[in-house]
Image: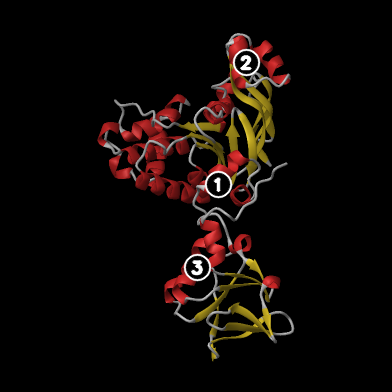
Amino acid sequence: MAAISIRNVDVVFGDSIKQSLALLDKGSTRQEIIDTTGDVVGVDNACIEVQEGEICVLMGLSGSGKSSLLRAVNGLNSVSRGELLVQDGDQMVDIATCDADKLRHMRTSKVSMVFQNFALMPWMSVVDNVAFGLDMKGMGKQERRAKAMEKLEMVGLSEWKDKLPHELSGGMRQRVGLARAFAMDSDILLMDEPFSALDPLIRSQLQDELIELQQRLNKTILFVSHDLDEALKIGTHIAIMESAKIIQHGKPEEIVLNPKTPYVADFVAHTNPLNVLCGRSLMSDSSDLEVSGDQWVLNQHDNTFISLDNEGKVASASRQELPLTLHHWHEGENIEQLAEGLLVMASPDVSMRSAIEIRYKTGLPLLLEENGRLVGMLSDKDFYHALLGRHFTVDEA
């Protein structure tokens, strides 16, 4: 079920909204509308659904409209046209048209926000900052403090409960912001570039922690980022924005493999595919392997061959006419224990990172089997294509 349903949403900032919307309908650009009415189009005809329990990343360069759309979800930006439906129990509330009381209810009970600049009260202790929203909801002091301590424990800051924000590092302050949002127990979290001001190492650590927390708490998260590597790492789905429009929405692997426009392809070409792509996306198909007599050629230069049985399963392998040991590798198995000269078979869903590590440890290509049959092979050529950004094709349509 969709937790957030955004249907043909426009967000226009200015005093001539009706005129600007009419110009949008005629195909005018953002700059043409600024020149004509002075209004700024923040979001142009956005359509997207965010499912319960997923992390959807709104991604784009500065000025693309991602923060404008995010802030519309909790009413900080007014919707000029369209429907912006947010789940409230068994019903969906249209943030674009709901009254002030309903909007207040949604902000205090259903939707929480984590800001880029932490937004902590400098005169309050860490625990009081976490409990602040609960105080606004009218929760008793003892109960809200207990809940705040529970969330501080969750983010590893319980020992810092009595410190002031200026006594904490940037990463720790961002953890306090996360704890405060989680303390509200909202179903939906809005996160506006929460890690972008942090050092790369701290940023990567917090990304990992967010993924771990999400696995435990199963919130619905709408996350704004300008960094595609970050989006690919944490996102269940990614919506890429350009000039106030959503130009592509899909799973991380879909974005990397099939960018819809040259603009998206530009992003993809400079990103790290290790955490996104899997063997199925990269492999050379088994039907493309060269056949020599009754054997299939893995590497002609060092005479590495395999034989298949009648069901298409790898039966034996050799290199330089010496037999190779076959090994079936499963996700989670320690790659460090693999030996050089071992011919490994894995699932086509093996991650690119694991596949490269296996190739490095064994010195041999990686075979991919599904339902007991050989379906493909990963060799250096396949890895190089991925690392050089040649694993995708742009959808010219």
Task: Residue 78 in the image: state x and y as whole percent.
Answer: 59, 19
Three-letter amino acid code at disc 1? Val
Q: Compared with residue 30, is residue 294 higher up or lower down, i.e. above or below?
A: below
Question: For this rendering, which residue is in front, 195 or 381?
Answer: 381
Question: For this rendering, which residue is in front, 178 or 287?
Answer: 287
Q: Is residue 164 left or right of residue 221?
A: left
Q: Residue at x 55, y 26 (%)?
A: 68
Q: Earlier in the sequence, mark 2 or mark 1?
A: 2
Question: For this rendering, which residue is in front, 27 or 6?
Answer: 27
Do labels 2 and 1 touch, CB within 8 Å?
Answer: no
Q: Secondary structure at mark 2?
A: helix
Spot the residue most to the front.
301
Question: Which residue does the numbered mark 2 point to in the structure image?
Answer: 33
Q: Is residue 294 left or right of residue 360?
A: right
Q: Which mark is in front, 3 or 2?
A: 2
**CA gap, disc 2 to disc 1?**
31 Å
Which quadrant would residue 30 be assigned to in this image?
top right
Do labels 3 and 2 touch, CB within 8 Å?
Answer: no
Three-letter amino acid code at disc 2? Ile
Q: Residue at x 58, y 54 (%)?
A: 390
Give the class, few, some or many, for how many residues have Cα within 10 Å of label 1's Cα (few <14, many ≥20): many
**CA gap, disc 3 to disc 2?**
54 Å
Question: Which residue does the numbered mark 1 point to in the structure image?
Answer: 268
In what quadrant of the picture does the N terminus appear? top right
Label placed on residue 332: 3
Task: Residue 186 in the image: state x and y as whole percent.
Answer: 53, 36
Give the class, few, some or many, for how many residues have Cα within 10 Å of label 3's Cα (few <14, many ≥20): few
